[in-house]
Amino acid sequence: MKSQPRTYIICLAVLVFCTTARLPAQEALTPQAALTRLKEGNTRFAADKPTTRDVTQKRRDEVAKGQHPFAVILTCADSRVSPELVFDQGLGDVFVVRVAGNVTDPAILGSIEYAVEHLKAPLIVVLGHESCGAVKAVIEKSHVEGNLEKLLKEVHVDDKLPEDKDQALAAGIKTNALFHAKQLTAQSPLIKDFVDHDRVQIAAGVYSLKSGKVDWLEPQKGSK
């Protein structure tokens, strides 16, 4: 019975190693190369020329051995926003974290920290989207209760917005995405350290539901 703690520790270590192992066939990308790969994928998607994704048994067997995503994407839970499709990627390519309003909190930050530290993903993208219901609710000061009320308190928009409703919503969506992109380093010492040492890059963008294109909002941080 005295050997159980040691056995448990060994088993736990093996589990962590297996779930975070990077496949040797996957060449690590630089942060800028990872961003370029996403941009090229979005160009294909918006042009209705997506690649044929490998979802065969062979590919499933490969990713079952370990995951090695080249990017982390924090985006909204909206059913019309599917990062793997928007960026024309396949199984195991991107580590996706989704929550209404693409906001940050300890659970979200912890998930991203895991992908950065253990899976070695070199890029983090905060992706807002056109017609975001969470942002719209905040701008219109909609009455909500319960956990939704708590969530909407994490959505940040400008104090001074255009009078036109459509323009106000568009501005609020951009502001919210940029705010939470900055929160990644403001609220996570680990992510900040990776960014400061050019090991991770952060980008923010807004996805257009109509055109399928991603509008990148600001120069990316980190490695050039």
Image (tube, rainbow, N blue to C red):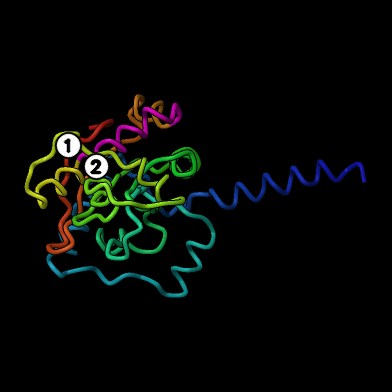
Position of residue 218 in the picture relative to residue 87 (left or right): left
Q: Which residues are magenta?
A: 175-190
Chief SS of the magenta region? helix
Of residues 105 and 148, the one drawn nearer to the viewer in this rendering: 148
Indicate the amino acid at tag 1. Glu
Q: CA distance from mark 2 to mark 1?
A: 7 Å
Query: What is the total number of numbered labels drawn onto the structure image?
Result: 2
Between residues 132 and 109, which one lies in front from this camera angle? 132
Residue at the front extreme? 143
Spot occupied by residue 170 in the image (x, y as percentages of width and height):
14, 48
Residue 77 as seen in the image, left or right of residue 61: left
Q: Determine the residue positioned at 50% across, 41% down.
A: 118
* Looking at the image, residue 99 lies above or below residue 177: below
Residue 204 numbered mark, or none: 2
Name the secondary structure under disc 1.
Answer: loop
Residue 84 at x, y percent in the picture? 32, 61
Per the rendering, the mark at residue 218 is 1
Quarter assignment of residue 193: top left
Which residue shows up at 15% across the image and 57% down it? 213
Q: Amino acid at mark 2?
A: Ala
Q: Position of residue 85 (x, y in %)?
A: 28, 64
Residue 27 position in % (x across, y down): 37, 48
Q: Is residue 1 left or right of residue 195?
A: right
Q: Residue at x 42, y 51 (%)?
A: 145
